[in-house]
Image (tube, helix red, strand yellow):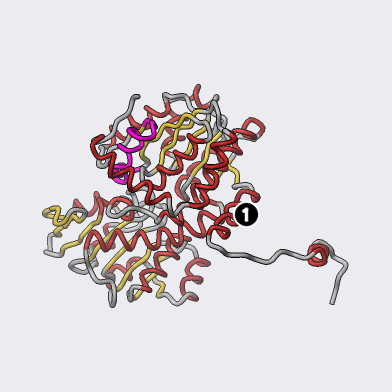
Amino acid sequence: MDYHVKDLSLADYGKNRIEWAEKDMPVLRTIRERFSKEKPLKGIRISACLHVTTETANLVRTLKEGGAEVFLTASNPLSTQDDVAAALVKFYDIPVFAVKGEDRETYYEHLREVIRREPHVVIDDGADLISTIHKEYPELAERVIGGMEETTTGVIRLRSMAREGVLKFPIIAVNDAYTKHMFDNRYGTGQSTIDGILRATNRLLAGSYFVVAGYGWCGKGLAMRARGMGAIVIVTEVDPIKALEARMDGFLVMPMKEAAKIGDFFVTVTGNTSVIRKEHFEVMKDGAIVANSGHFNVEIDLEALKGMSTSVRRIRENVEEFTLKDGRRIYVLSEGRLVNLASAEGHPASVMDMSFANQALCAEYIVKNGKTLKRDVYKVPEEIDKKVAELKLRSMGVEIDELTPEQVRYLSSWEFGT
């Protein structure tokens, strides 16, 4: 098997961790059991560009059980768990091309490795895989049945491609499933980002000013968790509706130029570029800690910070100290990349259970329906979203009501009045 991982000797530990995560992924386990019997993906090649974590391992195992030939590469140079990559190769016969800390050149070569397998279906996290196929392998793009995208950032990029008429195969925006973004983005990002910051810094959050840039679902979850740790949370936004929501949720709301003067911790979760930049670094307090939990490392303008600094040193494993010309020090976590994956282990398995259940069921849907779909970005079919929710509730031992026939008639009629 052709693969590129750091060290196969790490595989035993990785297998144990994959099994540990699997215990907390009952929805995906249920799907895998069905896939194993029905083989809905038989004869299908799937290339996936995802964070190589224990949860992802259980997704690709599920796809393989469904009959697919699966190839996996990393969607971020710092998010790979090397023991998991080794275990997938050694114990599950899944080719993996991912090494934590790989440089940009290696990252893109790994993307090309899984593209050269000529996939029928692609699964992406950030749209780097899909955009590389379109830019460098246009003939192959014409033969892809369809794909799925996991993140807000990736969906934005792919919708832009669809608007410009350059998207060559249909995409299902798994990120937009309710059972993904309402839970993965809010509870997953909220908890795992705090986890990454604490592991990297071992700093106390209680009593600090904690600045959250962006109040989408990720920002909501992060603000909620930071407040739960005792922090005074400040939200910065460009959308007046989201800013109003943040204020009504009880958070301070102000422009970044004002928040920069008082913040102790800063975390970007916007999906945009240069959210924290030179004008903000110029007024930050000595000792300010800056991190990013958006997909790409563009939200913090590190080039501007380097240009303002007289020295840069790594002071802890995932902490770089930038000393400015006036002596102030600003600390950047995880090189400005996803702090929850680079400094911690990413989302808990129980929340990724729903996200990856959507991925697995959407892979099945694409194989069945992809050739009839237009070259556009689609929402997850409602029946898949609800099925994932039902399975999750069942796994938690939760029962809910059903509409009576009378209630169904009432909701579908315009004739009933006061």
Choose between 229 and 241: the one closer to the eye: 229
- Other residues around mark 1 within 10 Å, as few (<14) / some (14–19) / many (≥20): some
Choose between 404 and 116: the one closer to the eye: 404
The residue that label 1 is drawn on is 386
Name the residue at 33% across, 76% down.
Answer: 230
Q: Residue 252 appears at what percent x and percent y? A: 40, 75
Q: Is residue 237 above or below residue 25?
A: below
Name the residue at 48% across, 46% down.
Answer: 150
Name the residue at 48% across, 40% down.
Answer: 62
Q: Quadrant of the C terminus?
A: bottom right
Question: Which amino acid, mark 1?
Answer: Lys
Q: Is residue 170 above or below residue 298?
A: above
Instruction: Write down the region rendered in magenta.
Output: 76-95
Q: Residue 405 appears at what percent x and percent y? A: 81, 63
Q: Seen in the image, is 375 located left or right of residue 414?
A: left
Q: Residue 247 appears at what percent x and percent y? A: 46, 74
Res 127 quadrant in image: top left
Can residue 1 be seen from the camera position used here?
yes
Q: Is residue 281 above or below residue 15?
A: below
> For residue 85: magenta?
yes
> For residue 167: magenta?
no
